[in-house]
Amino acid sequence: MVESLQAWSAYRRLRELVDAEVARELERSAGLSMPDYEVLATLVELTSADDCIRVRGLAERMLWAHSRLSRQLGRMEQRGLIAREACERDGRGDDVVLTEAGRQAYVEAAPGHQAVIRERFTDLLSEQQLHTLIAIERQIAAGHAVAPR
């Protein structure tokens, strides 16, 4: 039987290896940090071209603390990747809007990002291993009462 500490160490090592490669590629090819790309990708996934999302909703979707997301959004706003606007629906809180520059940065970064994920992650696993990984994520997300991605 695999010891739980061994499994946890293996997971951490896997995450560190893959994240480091992905982060280097994003910085090299697009000048984006991993958190930049995560925010951009989530905004692209959740919003249309003229749509927005509440900061709180974005934080919940990304499983980030509100304060962490606020700091990240501040850095991205300074670079013109996103904009924060007062929520028009109820006047409370802010909406996050993906700017054209942010959308373009995401589009330019995506091919390199996808290539390094294939090269350093998915191509190294069998089809069965990929299905198992997805099943593991779903089981753990369900145990945390979080919707799987």
Image (cartoon, rainbow, N blue to C red):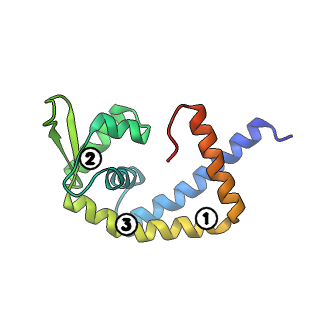
Q: Which amino acid does label 1 sit on?
A: Thr
Whole-number angstrom distance, CA of label 3 to CA of label 2:
18 Å
Q: In which quarter of the image is the N terminus?
A: top right
Q: Are marks 1 and 2 in contact (CB under 8 Å)?
A: no
**What distance separates the C-alpha of mark 3 from that of mark 1?**
18 Å
- Residue at mark 2: 75
Badge nearest the viewer, 3 or 2: 3
Q: Which of 127 and 39 is in front in this view?
A: 127
**Label placed on residue 31:** none
Q: Earlier in the sequence, mark 3 or mark 1?
A: 3
Picture quadrant of residue 125: bottom right
| First-in-chain label (1 vs 2) | 2
User: Residue visible at 48% across and 67% down?
Assistant: 114
**Residue 29 lies in quadrant:** bottom left
Report the residue at 42% width, 53% height from top.
34
**Is 145 rendered above or below residue 131?**
above
Using the image, determine if residue 11 lies above or below residue 87: below
Cα separation between marks 1 and 2: 31 Å
Mark 3 element type: helix
**Residue tagged by mark 1?**
122
Which callout, 3 or 1, points to the residue nearer the camera? 1
- Select label 1 or label 2 by which is in front: 1
Q: Position of residue 109 (x, y in %)?
A: 37, 66
Label 1: element kind: helix
